[in-house]
Image (cartoon, grey):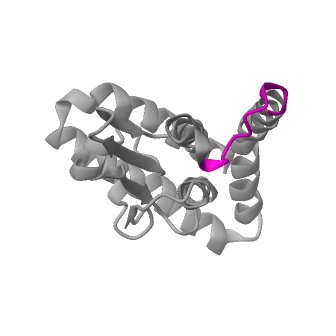
């Protein structure tokens, strides 16, 4: 019986695309759940916070009853490494250790620079004019804070994670 895989992603997210692509490249069957991070901001919902308390996409639930594996992974790089480890014949990572080291070095560099790319994109979009700036500030700062308030009321145990997300949100507002 193959592993049961559920990916929690959003279509436009590069990291979500990496997650789905790794699953498909490994040739594994999976179910995809689209998480609305725009209008409904489901990443701040109670149901999603139980899957990924970091409130981010992607996340992957991987259950292999034969191997007694039941994992939830919440980072695209970790998802790729996990899938490669659990499915060594998938071709996600070559067997040659020297080649693996080169790939890991490249991936580490990509992920180190990724937050810079994301921040640059938002700052660049906000420079296009007041309409874009207000849209980003409203949807990504004001609504995020409202959702975090609702989530914290329902789930006081998430107070520390919510506080970290508020700090990141305030930093984005300052960049504007």
**Vertical comparison of 166 with 97: above or below:** below
Closer to us: 53 or 24: 24
Residue 50 image point, x, y percent: 25, 42
Of residues 95 and 139, the one nearer the viewer is 95
Residue 97 in the figure: left or right of residue 33: right
What residue sits 83% from the left and 33% below the top?
99
Above or below — where is 12 with respect to 164?
A: below
Helix, strand or loop: magenta stretch: loop
List x then y, in percent, for residue 134.
57, 66
Residue 105 in the image: x percent, y percent? 80, 30
Residue 65 appears in the figure: yes
Position of residue 136 in the picture relative to residue 45 (left or right): right
Tell me if 156 is positioned left or right of 92 in this view: left
Nearest to the observer: residue 101 or residue 138: 101
Near-viewer residue (24 or 130):
24
Task: Name which quarter of the figure residue 85 lies in.
Answer: top right
Q: Residue at x 43, y 62 (%)?
A: 29
The question of residue 93 being in magenta is answered with yes
**Location of residue 26 in the rendering, given as x and y in whole percent from the top left corner:** 57, 54
Q: Which residues are magenta?
A: 90-99
Can see residue 35?
Answer: no
- The residue furthest left is 154
Residue drawn at x 69%, y 51% is 118
- Name the residue at 57% across, 45% down: 76
- Residue 133 on the magenta segment: no
How many marks overall? 0
Q: Is residue 11 toward the left or the right of residue 144 in the image?
A: right
Residue 133, by quadrant, is bottom right
């Amino acid at each position: 019986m193959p592993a049961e895989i559920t990916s929690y992603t959003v279509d436009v997210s590069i990291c979500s695309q990496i997650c789905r692509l790794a699953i498909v490249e490994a040739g594994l069957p999976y179910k995809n759940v689209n998480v609305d991070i725009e209008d409904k901001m489901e990443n701040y919902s109670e149901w999603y916070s139980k899957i990924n308390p970091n409130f981010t996409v992607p996340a992957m639930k991987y259950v292999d009853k034969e191997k007694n594996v039941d994992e939830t992974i919440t980072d695209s790089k970790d998802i790729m490494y996990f899938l490669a480890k659990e499915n060594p014949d998938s071709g996600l990572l070559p067997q040659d250790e020297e080649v693996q080291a080169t790939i890991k070095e490249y991936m580490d560099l990509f992920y180190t620079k990724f937050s810079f790319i994301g921040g640059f994109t938002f700052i660049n979009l906000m420079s296009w004019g007041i309409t874009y700036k207000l849209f980003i500030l409203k949807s990504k700062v004001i609504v995020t804070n409202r959702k975090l308030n609702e989530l914290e009321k329902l789930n006081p145990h998430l107070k520390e994670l919510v506080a970290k997300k508020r700090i990141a949100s305030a930093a984005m507002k300052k960049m504007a």
